[in-house]
Image (spheres, helix red, strand yellow):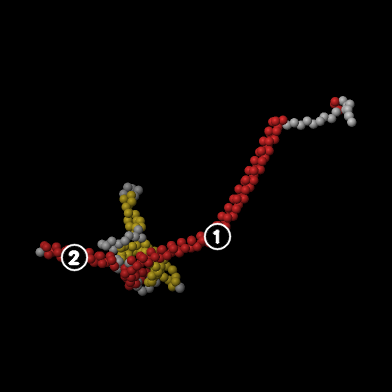
Amino acid sequence: MIKINLLPKGFQKRSIDFSLGKKGLYSVVAAAAIIVMLIGVTMFQKYQLSQLDENIEKAQQRAAMLEKDIKVVDALTDVKNKITLRMSAVERLDSHRSSWVKLLEDIARNVPEFVWMGQFKEKPLVVASAKPSPDGKKAEATKPASPKPAKSNQPTVRNAEIEGYAFTLNALASFMIKMMRSDYFENVELMATSEMEIQKKKVYRFMLSCNVHYLSDEDLRSKIASVDNKSKNAVAENKSLN
């Protein structure tokens, strides 16, 4: 069958002619490549996020497992520090055992009636050091000195604080006088005193500062030996003069 369209050209149906050409084809290919690349980047990032989540979960599990171990280590460290402090205190007491016994015996003899001790605390010795003052002159300032081992020709000196209680100020004064007369203590000073009540009785709480002199057995033997040597030298010199 043959069909002939006798309608004018203005009324005839026009067929759609769609042609991209080379440039359009390249554009479509480029757009597709970009879409594929974006999809690949998105999938890779999702993979990385999943890996990070797994690593975070593993790290949290590891931290939970190590938390108990960390607590145990901290507790052991604390125990070690306490043991070290106690061992150092025991070593200090053991190195001057006889001296501490003599010191405590002397303090016990010096405590009068109506006075009782509360605490005896050893502190670093405070020595004077010259520092320039604002007017250009040298002024003396105090600073704590680190404890050093005793030399053979001089006693070891430490600064100490004594806390206690007294029923009367006369008893406190008597205690201070006895401390001043002792061979083991010097520069005894009253640092603070306050009135308080204990079991409805008025008492005086006091704090004394003093310098403590003590000699270990080794220092005492070396001191006696040095004195004997000096006496022998003096006798030898007298004989040579005669």
Marks 1 and 2, the one that precedes in the sequence: 1
CA gap, disc 1 and disc 2: 74 Å
Determine the secondary structure under disc 2: helix
Which quarter of the picture shows residue 123? bottom left
Which residue is depicted at the point 33% across and 72% down? 105
Q: Position of residue 184 (x, y in %)?
A: 30, 67
Q: Residue furthest front?
A: 1
Q: Position of residue 126 (x, y in %)?
A: 34, 59
Which quarter of the picture shows residue 234? bottom left
Is residue 190 visible from the viewing direction of this image? no
Q: Quadrant of the N terminus?
A: top right
Is 114 on the left or on the right of 66, as rendered? left
User: What amino acid is found at the position of numbered circle 1 in the picture?
Assistant: Met
* Viewer-side residue, 153 vs 171: 153
Q: Name the residue under label 1.
A: 65
Vertical order, 15 against 84 (above or below): above
Which quarter of the picture shows residue 218? bottom left
Which residue is depicted at the point 56% across and 55% down? 59
User: What amino acid is found at the position of numbered circle 2 in the picture?
Assistant: Ser
Crowding at dot 1, Cα within 10 Å, few <14 / some 14-19 / many 20+, comes out as few
Q: Residue furthest top?
A: 8
Any mark on residue 208, and which?
none
Q: Position of residue 202 (x, y in %)?
A: 43, 71
Confirm or deny contact between disc 1 and disc 2 (CB under 8 A): no
Is residue 230 visible from the viewing direction of this image? yes
Q: Name the residue under label 2.
A: 231
Which residue is depicted at the point 81% across and 30% down? 15
Q: Position of residue 204 (x, y in %)?
A: 40, 69
* Viewer-side residue, 157 vs 142: 157
